[in-house]
Amino acid sequence: MFAVLADDVRLAWCDGDAVFLKAGDYICVPRRHAVALADAINGKPIAETGAVLTELREQGLLAWRDERLPPRAAVIVAASDLGDVARREPAGLRDYAHLLIAALYVPLQLIRRRPEAWLRYLPPQALTPRGTPEQLARRFLRLRGLIPASGRCLPASLLLINFLRLGGIAADLVIGVRTHPFEAHCWVETGGKVLNDEICYCRSFSPIFVWRGAARMDPDPAA
């Protein structure tokens, strides 16, 4: 028997610790137990990995399978950001309208606890882009102060995802975690570029959930 992640469970490794994400809750496994977990996830038979796996299974974080699954590919954080964020793109009336429409979707998204469910409620994506992702992101940064609570990472990132879609751009939503102390953070990226944060800060987090809006329209689990 081999251990695999249970359905809708995500896993990230942070400086030797393991962090699970399940239904909006984070569960940390300290490094003294994470070794057995890593062995199991990497294909070592359950009988050789210790009793800690049984407890994780009882919590609904792991499941048993008869066959070994191939390891998931590592998630790589984007390579760059917008650089000088003070350089803002001029915004027009349509950008103001798109910001307000984008903001209407955010409460509908946040009322759900599961990250997968946030992105089932999206504005329609325009067929023709109204600029590059960088241009639209700079317009967004110019305007987002008009929306209350848009400074927090999750509402701001969902707001940007919605704004970009209305402007004809699909982007990825990334949630990352780190430990000692525990912290979660999210940001938006596309084409290898972070659109609403600094790359050096995002690289201090291990991705645990990635929604590949730029590639397809369903959630993609982080490795």
Image (tube, rainbow, N blue to C red):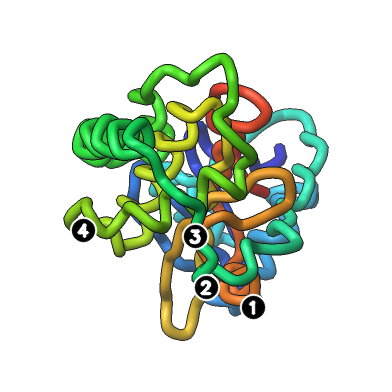
Q: Nearer the viewer, mark 4 or mark 2?
A: 4
Q: Secondary structure at mark 4?
A: loop
Work out how far the residue at label 1 is from the one at label 3, CA to CA, in angstroms. Answer: 36 Å
* Residue density around tag 1, few if under 14, some if 14–19, many if 20 or more, within 10 Å: few
Residue 210: give x, y in percent of width and height: 57, 44
The residue beneath circle 3 is 88
Discs 2, 1 touching: Cβ within 8 Å = yes
Work out how far the residue at label 2 is from the one at label 3, CA to CA, in angstroms. Answer: 31 Å
Q: Going by the image, does 64 lie left or right of 113? A: right
Q: Residue furthest bottom?
A: 180
Lower position in the chain sequence, tag 2 or tag 3: 3
Lower position in the chain sequence, tag 4 or tag 2: 4
Q: Give the residue type at disc 3.
A: Arg
Q: Give the residue type at disc 2.
A: Arg
Discs 2, 3 touching: Cβ within 8 Å = no
The residue beneath circle 4 is 149
Q: Nearer the viewer, mark 4 or mark 3?
A: 3
Lower position in the chain sequence, tag 4 or tag 3: 3
Q: Nearer the viewer, residue 95 or 204?
A: 95
Work out how far the residue at label 4 is from the one at label 2, CA to CA, in angstroms. Answer: 23 Å
- Which residue is pictured at 57% across the width and 47% down the height? 135
Vertical position of residue 18 compared to residue 24: above or below: below
Work out how far the residue at label 4 is from the one at label 3, CA to CA, in angstroms. Answer: 20 Å
- Which residue is pictured at 64% across the width and 60% down the height? 37
Work out how far the residue at label 2 is from the one at label 1, CA to CA, in angstroms. Answer: 8 Å
* Residue density around tag 4, few if under 14, some if 14–19, many if 20 or more, within 10 Å: few
Work out how far the residue at label 1 is from the one at label 4, CA to CA, in angstroms. Answer: 31 Å
Vertical position of residue 182 compared to residue 105: above or below: below
The residue beneath circle 2 is 178
Task: Answer whether residue 109 is visible to the viewer in this image.
Answer: no
